[in-house]
Image (spheres, rainbow, N blue to C red):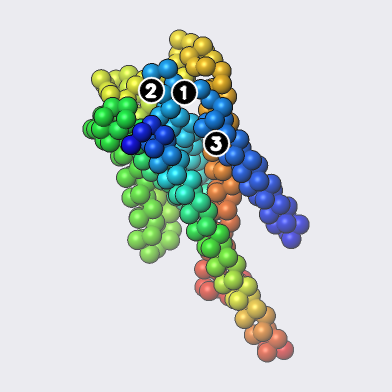
Amino acid sequence: MADLKHNKGRGRKILGWLALLFILLGLYFGLVQAPPDAYQGNVQRIMYLHIPSILTAYFSFFIVFVGSCLYLWKREKRDDILAHAAAEIGVLFTGLTIVEGSIWGKPAWGVWWTWDARLTLTAILFLIFVGYLMLRSLIEDENRGAVCGAVLGIVGFLDIPLIHMSVYWWRTLHQPPSILRPDKLPWENIHPSMLLALSINFVAFLLLYFYFLSLRIRVGEMEEEVKRFKLYGGQ
Amino acid sequence: MGPWGFVFLAYGIVWVSLLLYLSVLWRRLRKAEAELSGLRSLRGSRIEDRW
């Protein structure tokens, strides 16, 4: 048991250092190595944060969806801890995506915010999961809170396909996907050095995400253990 | 604000927020560890008292 904990701690450390390495590489490739965009100039460099952070948020809410389904099916506390941890980190990355998008929107579109379908649905996604976190902290009965959270986590995830398809279904200011298009391969749509910078930043965000998730799960497990100790004296 | 101003504003907000969240996680982890070890040592001393 002690060995397992030690190995987990060492794995987490390696993950943290790897994330830091890729973050530094991502900053170099995004801010220095990649050329400025032909139309938008240097402001397009925000893309190297914007796309990785929203994809990380989507992935995080997928983990919430899986953890919530597993919890409703098996009622195991570890699945609830996983879903709760992923929801918290997903809210962080969604919030950052909205802020980055707003900062990018001002020079590109002339406005900080517009009630465009994709932007509005992303704001709704953010609010759903802020609601999830509030629900978890407000319901005192832990099992009831976990069940309500799991239901909201599953419903909230269903907003993601709507966000993705919104640019096809409605006329929006937000452009449709320019890299992952159904009619072309990714490297046919973007300069290779831009694609490299984007890929490195995406890997950096994913590594950082898994580092955060492992830390947040550990926090959840320890808080659970403290509660158990207080209730049953560590039995 | 020029294009680089927007870029640095976005990068600054993102990386400062992520660092802040990391420090919050570390603090919560340390707090939970300290509380748990306190409870464990309390339990150990009670068992010793009983014997």
Residue A99 is marked as none
Q: Kindly give the residue lying farthest to the top in the view shown.
A: A183
Crowding near the residue tagged with mark 3, few <14, some 14–19, many ≥20 C-alpha atoms within 10 Å: some
Q: Type of residue at label 3?
A: Leu
Crowding near the residue tagged with mark 2, few <14, some 14–19, many ≥20 C-alpha atoms within 10 Å: few
Q: Position of residue B12 (x, y in %)?
A: 45, 44
Return the disc, 2 or 3, that comes first in the chain's sequence: 3
What residue did someone put label 3 on? A27
- Residue A176's quadrant in the figure? top left
Q: Type of residue at label 2?
A: Gln
Q: Is residue A94 left or right of residue A221?
A: left
What residue did someone put label 1 on? A36
Residue A40 is marked as 2
| Chain of residue at mark 3 | A
Task: Mark 1 and mark 2 in contact? Answer it, CB < 8 Å.
Answer: yes
Judged by depth in the image, the label closer to the viewer, 1 or 3, is 1
Q: Kindly give the residue lying farthest to the right in the view shown.
A: A3
Return the disc, 1 or 3, that comes first in the chain's sequence: 3
| Chain of residue at mark 2 | A
Q: CA distance from mark 2 to mark 3?
A: 19 Å
Secondary structure, mark 2, is loop
| Residue A77, placed above or below residue B51 | above
- Residue at 43 percent across and 27 percent down: it is A42
Q: Type of residue at label 1?
A: Pro
Q: Kindly give the residue lying farthest to the front in the view shown.
A: B2
Q: Position of residue B42 (x, y in %)?
A: 62, 81
The quadrant of the rendering that contains the C terminus of chain A is bottom right
| Residue A180, placed above or below residue A145 | above
- Residue at 65 percent across and 50 percent down: it is A12
Q: Is residue A169 visible?
A: yes
